[in-house]
DNA sequence: GTTGTATTCAACCAATCAGTTGAGGATGCG
DNA sequence: CGCATCCTCAACTGATTGGTTGAATACAAC
């Protein structure tokens, strides 16, 4: 389904374990075993979680003997931040404009809910 | 599963239709019908999507006759932004520290695109 | 070469999810 | 009232997901 990057990133971070893994990787690289230790699930489950994070571009892995150290790829966060900030700002601007309009007309509380037309 | 707010928010935004709805609501409030119009799914499907956004706290609804105008609740974005920024910053700081350490020992210049310590 | 450690693959299961159709509630209008 | 409009609830379906167990790979060490 959601083959686009943004969907994968949001989807990856929708899981508490995966968010926790990201949080711990932010403090430093770690192996699958190390990452799996605190959780009450099997190692394979954690391996899958890491795979999801990797597919989303949030984590990369290198090789160190039989270990596969995981590394947090911070750049991808920018994608999310940009998306979020864009619409947050838009919504806030709109709110501010509405506020100004209401203030300007000062009195009549506009009987007809004028909530249509979304041409940018 | 994801009973915490952050999971619900990320999960809600993991769907392209829902992200598009958010994008359009950032430009102004809209009814379910208006929102459903551009998509190739039934009205009920869109109604469900809106419900998910509402449960995540991203959207609120009022009543206008038989219409249920949807409104973007921008505050919730802050929750996400805070989470993201926290770990992004941590990861970047760590990266910068590592960079400094490497520089101090005059090691192999990790060279060129200093954004990755890639596995070659 | 055998053993041990770290990790993944494969097959399966239960739960959730995005979508459907069809019926039903709420409200405004003639 | 009867009827159309806007929207939601209920039940179902197929796909995805998070989890499991068990076998297999990759590598180091003995």
Image: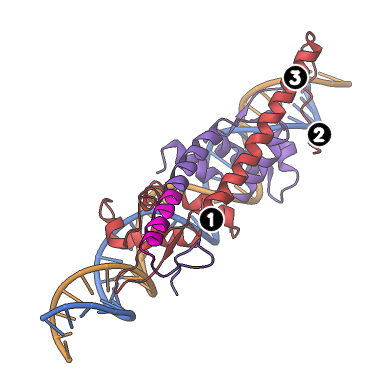
Chain colours: A red, B purple, C orange, D blue
Which span of residues is magenta-colored?
B91-106
Residue A62 location in percent, x, y?
A: 39, 69
Q: Residue at x 45, y 75 (%)?
A: B120
First along the sequence among labels 2 and 1: 1
Say if mark 3 contacts mark 1, CB within 8 Å. no
Quarter of the rendering containing residue A103: top right
Residue A37 visible in this rendered orientation of the protein:
yes
Q: In this orientation, which residue lies closer to the viewer: C11 or B55? A: B55
Front-most of residues A39 and D13: A39
The residue that disc 3 covers is A100
Q: Are marks 2 and 3 in contact (CB under 8 Å)?
A: no
Residue B32: name its quadrant. Answer: top right
Residue B105 sits inside the magenta stretch: yes
Q: Position of residue C28 (x, y in %)?
A: 78, 20
Chain-order first, disc 3 or disc 1: 1
- The percent position of residue D14, horizontal first and vertical second, equals 55, 61
Indicate left or right for A89 with A30 as reference: right
Q: Which mark is residue A117?
A: 2
The chain that hosts pointer 3 is A
State how far apart marks 2 and 3 are (Cα): 19 Å
Q: Quadrant of the N terminus of chain B?
A: top left
Q: Residue at x 70, y 30 (%)?
A: A93
Q: Where B38 sits versus B27, above or below?
A: below
Tag 1 residue: A8
Label 1: chain letter = A
Q: What is the distance, in whole Å, between disc 3 and disc 1 at their CAs?
A: 39 Å
Residue C4 to residue A1: above or below: below
Magenta: main secondary structure equals helix
């Amino acid at each position: 389904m959601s083959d686009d990057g943004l969907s994968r990133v949001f989807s990856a971070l929708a899981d508490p374990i995966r968010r926790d893994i990201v949080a711990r990787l932010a403090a430093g690289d770690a192996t699958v075993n190390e990452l799996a230790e605190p959780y009450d699930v099997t190692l394979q489950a954690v391996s899958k979680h890491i795979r999801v994070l990797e597919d989303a571009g949030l984590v990369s892995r290198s090789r160190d003997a039989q270990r596969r150290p995981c590394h947090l790829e911070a750049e991808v966060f920018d994608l999310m931040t940009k998306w979020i900030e864009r619409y947050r700002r838009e919504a806030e601007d709109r709110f501010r404009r509405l506020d100004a309009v209401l203030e300007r007309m000062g009195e009549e509380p506009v009987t007809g809910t004028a909530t249509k037309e979304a041409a940018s």
